[in-house]
Amino acid sequence: MLDALFSALSGLGVSSRKIQTSANNLANVQTSGFKASRADVADTKTGGATVTSVSRSSAQGSILTTSNPMDLAVGGNGFFQVALPNGGTGFTRAGNFKLDGAGRLVTSDGNPLIPEIAVPAGATEIAIGETGQVNAQVAGGIVNLGQIQLANFANPAGLSAAGGNVLLETAASGAPLAGNPGTGEFGTLISGAVEGSNVDIAGEIVDQIVAKAAFKANISVIKTADEMTGSILDIKA
């Protein structure tokens, strides 16, 4: 009886975690560059189940044209590197960049790109090539403003979420390897576009229905086990 109770309790935890993960995916359907997550489940020695990890899909999201030259989508592998307020480095696929007060290319949350790209005052016609070269028109002609680099990981699914669509390096992801877009295993940049979320809405809804059904089933098992345990105790009394 106790085995059934503990197994059902572990099932409640798994179902709850699956629902939370799916809900977060659905909440970010319109978040640029967002990668859907899933709860990975394994059986326990006691007959129950547990969530061993939450992994992230690396599937390419749809490319959405914006016509803003500072919007960038990565076609293929790689993450933009950004400087975080705490001094660390974050990684993101969200390429909706803008200029801050110092003329630096930053994310929508104000995190500067690494390596830093600074646009001089008065510069016009900013152009970013598929290999990451950034050029702009100034009074003296066209000047090169720098090179955008991407970072890649041995296991991108192992990156941890830090909020704000920013990911962090972990032991599971391995150390980042930086390089220019279009070289080696790195994807190319698509200027004037952003990568959409790769969340499958229909799939997430199905997953939530299944998880909620499993949650209710485990609740029923717990209630039944509780009633039977009560009956046994009453008999013994």
Image (cartoon, rainbow, N blue to C red):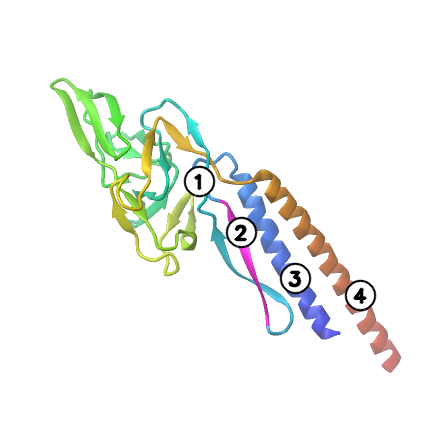
Residue 233 in percent (x, y) is at: 83, 77
Q: Could you tell me how far apart the alpha carbons at marks 3 and 2 are, in whole angstroms?
A: 16 Å
Disc number lying in front (3 or 2) = 2
Residue position for label 3? 11
Q: Could you tell me how far apart the alpha carbons at marks 4 and 3 are, in whole angstroms?
A: 15 Å
Disc number lying in front (2 or 4) = 2
Q: Is residue 158 left or right of residue 151?
A: right
Residue position for label 4? 224
Q: Which mark is residue 60?
A: 1
Image quadrant holding the C terminus, namely: bottom right
Count neighbours of disc 1 (C-alpha within 10 A) and say few if under 14, some if 14 to 19, many if 20 or more.
Answer: some
What type of secondary structure mainly makes up the magenta span? strand
**Vertically, is 18 above or below 226?**
above
Q: Earlier in the sequence, mark 2 or mark 4?
A: 2
Q: Which mark is residue 38?
A: 2
Q: Earlier in the sequence, mark 2 or mark 1?
A: 2
Q: Earlier in the sequence, mark 3 or mark 2?
A: 3
Determine the residue positioned at 46% across, 37% down.
61
Q: Could you tell me how far apart the alpha carbons at marks 2 and 1 are, in whole angstroms?
A: 16 Å
Q: Secondary structure at mark 3?
A: helix
Residue 26 in percent (x, y) is at: 56, 40
